Image (spheres, rainbow, N blue to C red):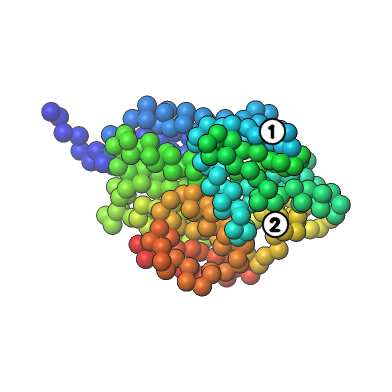
Amino acid sequence: MKVTANIAQQCVGKSFYALGTTINLTAFGTASEGDLEDTYHLITAYEDKLTVNRTNSEIMAINRAAGKEPIQVSSGTYQLVKKAVEISRKHEGFNVAIGPLVKLWRIGFKEANVPDEQQIEAKRVLTDPKRIILNDMNMSVFLPDSGMELDLGGIAKGYIADRIRSLWDSRGILAGIINLGGNILTIGACPLHEDHKWRIGVQNPWQKRGKPLILEKVGPCSAVTSGVYERYFETTGKKYHHILDSRTGYPLKTDLVSVTVFTKDSIVGEIESTRLFFAGSLPLNWGEKRSDLYGAIFVYRDQSIRRYGFQQ
């Protein structure tokens, strides 16, 4: 058998547009283009089920049936919605029922606008996650009030990234990078550096994309950022970012520009980055009793930086 030199450093890559962003996949070793093609199909299959930016999906079927009837969904969609509802009911920032406010403001789309207070209040009362009715036996979701809408935008990428990792594990892919538009999940030991650490940059909010403020050397992990420097619009001299606070109906008031969280699982990174962004600073004892929370980096409007953790 012919020996191939440095096979651990060989890689295949694939880039494409999905989930509203550019996806970049890199797998090392003996991974094949077929593996990445299967990953593409996995991503698009989940997008077909979870998106709210198309007419038809399982989530849109739930939303259209609000106030009318429960909708039965596939097991993966149901488990993700159930997790999202559970997190939302803790009222720590993420709210899966934020849909009516997202559609009202339209931040990130050309129709973005500042609604009036009456419009905001009318939609805000439809964002109570405690109103969502789940049926485990039927795997159905019911939004009891007409006008309620689910939006999984703050958690779906993390869930999908973790599913990709499971697929790659099943294929024996020992090292790789899953980049879902800035939501990054690294797998295994990095074959490109002697220390086997991955280099993950934290975006500089005041520079164009690709210019890191900090470069971390980390083991296999997820890196997820919540930030206000990319999706926003300006009108009458004021900026409105896309992170909406369902308690007020307006974009969250904060001194932060971004929070990047390093975790074991990407869905946890999604949840924690939102939670820490709403908290404004690191909660007392964060990560002390959890081995899956590695560290966090806070970047503030005054350009100060606070870095925590990284006890991998």
Nearer-the-camera pick, 253 or 206: 253
Nearer-the-camera pick, 23 or 43: 43
Residue 163 x/y as whole percent: 43, 39
Instruction: Determine which residue is flagged by label 1.
Output: 69
Residue at the farthest front position:
137
Instruction: Determine which residue is flagged by label 2.
Output: 245
Tell me the residue at 35%/62% (across/down). Answer: 312
**Along the polypeptide, which appears first: circle 2 or circle 1?**
1
Tell me the residue at 54%/54% (across/down). Answer: 271
- Quarter that holds the N terminus: top left
- The residues tagged by marks 2 and 1 sit, at their Cα atoms, a distance apart of 28 Å
Residue at the farthest bottom position:
284
Residue 221 in view, yes or no: yes
Nearer-the-camera pick, 309 or 191: 309
In terms of image quadrants, where is residue 309? bottom left
Residue 110 in view, yes or no: no
151 w.r.t. 303: above or below? above
124 w.r.t. 19: above or below? below
Q: What amino acid is labelled 2 in the image?
A: Asp
144 w.r.t. 247: above or below? above
Residue 104 x/y as whole percent: 77, 45
